[in-house]
Image (cartoon, rainbow, N blue to C red):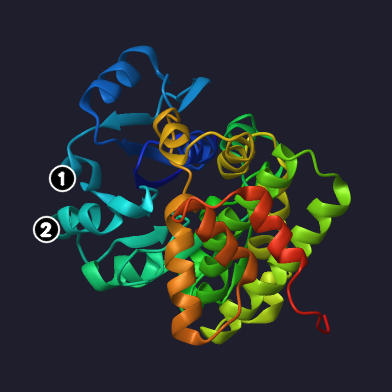
Amino acid sequence: MNANKISIAIIGAGSWGTALSVVLAPRFERIRLWAHETDLVERMAASRVNDVFLPGFQLPDNVEPVSDLKFALQDAGIVIGVMPSRFARAVYSAMLPHVDAGMRFVSATKGLENGTLLRMSEVAREVLGKKFAVLSGPTFAREVARGEPTAVVISSDDQELAGSIQREFSGPSFRLYTNDDPAGVEIGAALKNTIAIGAGICQGLGLGNNSSAALITRGLAEITRLAVAMGGQPRTLAGLAGLGDLVLTCTGELSRNRSVGIELAKGRKLAEIVSSMKMIAEGVETTSAAVDLARKFNVDLPITQQMDSILRGGRSPREAIRDLMERTLKNE
């Protein structure tokens, strides 16, 4: 272990937050892993395993599960927000009285806030008044926790902040690349979940590789259009936080959003699918926000709009795919 003397607080003990605690443990003297559920914290403290969100992985000795937010943030040099997007504003608001000037902040939540249409780092900055770096990329939590080689992006308008997080987080199995385009990174992170629902639908309908490849490629095109309209850079979407994350989420067996699409294609109702899942599929809520953003920025998002018609309008997945194929012919 080559830990530095900085302590970190990971706010959110879902699968990704827990995996981050495992992979970052050798790099830090102490990590506090905060969860809202006191019973989960008690079990993690006793068994050293997150039996709900990441079973099968032992928490390192220097990871301390906690349910007291004030205690979690005490003496933390770096704070990572990994809560579900729907709870982000409330959790950051609860954190506000316990934040001090010396803390550095990282947002690792992938999603958009419904209503305001803000990206997660924008929500955090609005509440806390602090600069944030954004951590994103192609990551399945279980593979990160197993120590499989993983490459991600750390993005911020403040390159000194991004560089410091890069140096302190990077290790033998976890490589960080800096990036100065948080808007592009966060739009890629959010909308790839919507496209992954579509990829799952293709799988569930028994469509082949041609269909999946077309969906992923055209999905990347519309994500890029929206990101650029919002000030992002096209090259970001060709990298880890764009194409890399999109391919993983659309094709990987561990993808929750892809699983939602598969089940929708089988005829299951969305409410039934969501209620049966232990973890949140962010694409379900992100899709409606993405449609609203497309309207606001006058950007055409045909796949996203069809996914929204399925998720909110109850449309048949097969009809939605057919309509995508029958759209007016155009140049690529």
Relative image position of residue 290 (x, y in whole percent): 48, 68
SS of the residue under disc 1: helix
Q: Residue drawn 24% across and 36% down?
A: 36
Q: Which residue is mark 2?
A: 97
Relative image position of residue 108 (x, y in whole percent): 45, 54
Q: Residue drawn 63% across and 43% down?
A: 258
Tag 2 near tag 1, CB within 8 Å: yes
Q: Is residue 7 above or below residue 217?
A: above
Pick the quarter of the image with the N terminus: top right
Instruction: In this rendered view, identify the residue nearer to me: 154 or 250.
Output: 250
- Residue type, label 1: Lys
- Residue type, label 2: Pro
> Could you tell me if residue 138 is visible in this image?
no
Q: Residue drawn 75% across and 59% down?
A: 215
> Could you tell me if residue 156 is visible in this image?
yes
> In which image quadrant can residue 148 be found?
top right
Instruction: In this rendered view, identify the residue nearer to me: 172 or 252.
Output: 252
**Tag shown at residue 70:** 1
Relative image position of residue 9 (x, y in whole percent): 33, 45
Q: Is residue 312 above or below residue 23?
A: below
In the drawing, does residue 7 fall left or right of residue 313? left
Q: Is residue 118 above or below residue 33?
A: below
> In which image quadrant can residue 331 be found?
bottom right
Relative image position of residue 222 (x, y in whole percent): 66, 73
In the drawing, does residue 69 fall left or right of residue 22? left
